[in-house]
Amino acid sequence: MTLRTLTVGLGDRSYPIHIGRGLLARAELLSPHLASRRAAVVTNTTVAPLYAEAVERAIAACGATSFRVVIPDGEAEKRWETLDRVYGELLAAQADRKTVIVALGGGVVGDLAGFAAATYQRGVPFIQVPTTLLAQVDSSVGGKTGVNHPLGKNMIGAFHQPLAVVADTATLDTLPDRELAAGLAEVVKYGALGDIEFLGWLEEHVERLRARDPEALSRAILRSCEIKARIVALDEREAGPRALLNLGHTFGHAIETLEGYGTWLHGEAVAAGMVMAARFSARLGRAPESDAHRLEALLRRAGLPVAPPRLPADRWLDAMGRDKKNESGRITLVLLDRLGAATVEKNAPAAELEAFLAGR
Ligand code: NAD
Ligand code: GLY
């Protein structure tokens, strides 16, 4: 696919999302942000041997220098202690406030390196170079950065927008199938929350997506980024509609926290969480039962789990009670009115929710 560029419109903090094959080598995408600067390439032990050299060559071609910071792989590493190690390596290398952090990897690297950028010396610039489907369609866009806490997912963080997102779709060639499917969960999310036509297209093409058909993947990434960029531009700090992007996430984050970070992949937990949100919406009479079945069928075909783990209702409620969308002790949920239309419900009926979680 030829290079496609979208813009996240945030005034003087607007930035491009570049999408296409072979972009890691395209120094001209980095040079507006890096010329005669120093870059810290933050990546992990899996991605570094695959792609770090290509990125470092492109940085050198911009006339910039770079050093590498490599963290261990895994969701369990998205924590304070790993972040502290990154600060230590930045300081040891004498990174200054002009140093640009280049986050090379999936959502874990992007979130953690982005939070390092938001906080190191009160904030340094950063560039997202996402290498998973999930990161290319979701986590690299929008400026949410942070780490997990043992008591809750993404509980420590900051909004910090990147200078640019460079999504090289060729990097997906090396992504394990399970990780590709996890990314498809977030792609399906965009259709479910606001674009029924896109959802229909996904139903037609899910097998092509799982087979990594480059055309189909590019189209899915582009449409996902268009939807996310539009919502982020409307509501950068989640005062309103951005919360829709959390469809399935209140249940999903509880699954990740309660089962131990990394046991369920984020996208897997979101898939099961979206089915829970759809079923709960149907139970409340807000959405047709058939829509919950339709969503479940698509996620199943995408290779994703659709049934939540069996957990006592009080543990669900405890974990969901710490969600960032909650206000005044009330659990906020994103619910479906129908497939393709979601709403934020700040007053989810507590007794109904408890009965639903208890399987009654
Ligand atoms: P991840 O970062 O753990 O990457 C998944 C796995 O794929 C890892 O083992 C990684 O090393 C490996 N990998 C990465 N790129 C590869 C490649 N090209 N080839 C082979 N292996 C590769 O997981 P993820 O699914 O990318 O991201 C999940 C994280 O993103 C979660 O922590 C979630 O909370 C976060 N997230 C953040 C936002 C946001 O707005 N900031 C949105 C959605 C998700
Ligand atoms: N993934 C949710 C958001 O970016 O708002």
Image (spheres, grey):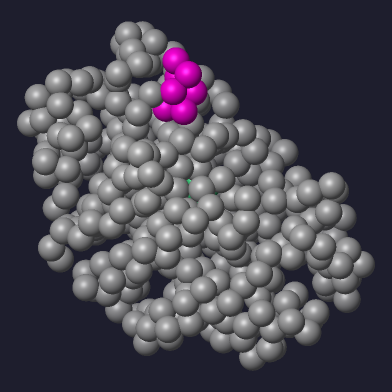
Instruction: Pick out the residue farthest to the right.
Output: 351
Residue at image x 44%, y 48%? 142
Q: Is most of the magenta stretch helix, strand or loop?
A: helix
Which residue occupies 26% across, 67% down?
A: 218
For this rendering, which residue is in front, 327 or 111? 327
Q: Identify the image quadrant of residue 33.
A: top left
Q: Is residue 130 visible?
A: yes
Check the image and report above or below for 305 versus 242. below
Does residue 309 appear anywhere in the picture? Answer: no
Give the percent coordinates (x, y) of residue 270. 58, 62
Coordinates of residue 199 in the picture (x, y in percent): 45, 80
Q: Residue at x 42, y 65 (%)?
A: 227
Q: Quadrant of the C terminus?
A: bottom right
Residue pictured at 60% horizontal, 41% vertical: 154
Task: Give above or below for 358 relative to 29.
Answer: below
In the foreground, 239 or 201: 239
Total numbered labels: 0
- Tell me where residue 278 appears, x and y as whole percent: 67, 76
In the rendered image, the quadrant that contains the N terminus is bottom left
Please say whether residue 80 is one of the residues in the magenta stretch. Answer: no
Residue 119 forms part of the magenta stretch: yes
Left or right, residue 279 beside residue 357:
left
Judging depth in this view, the residue of 358 and 242 nearest the camera is: 242
Q: Position of residue 287 (x, y in %)?
A: 69, 84
**Eyeballing the image, is 326 above or below 274?**
above
Tell whether 198 sits left or right of 341: left
Residue range (magenta)? 117-123
Q: Is residue 63 left or right of residue 324?
A: left
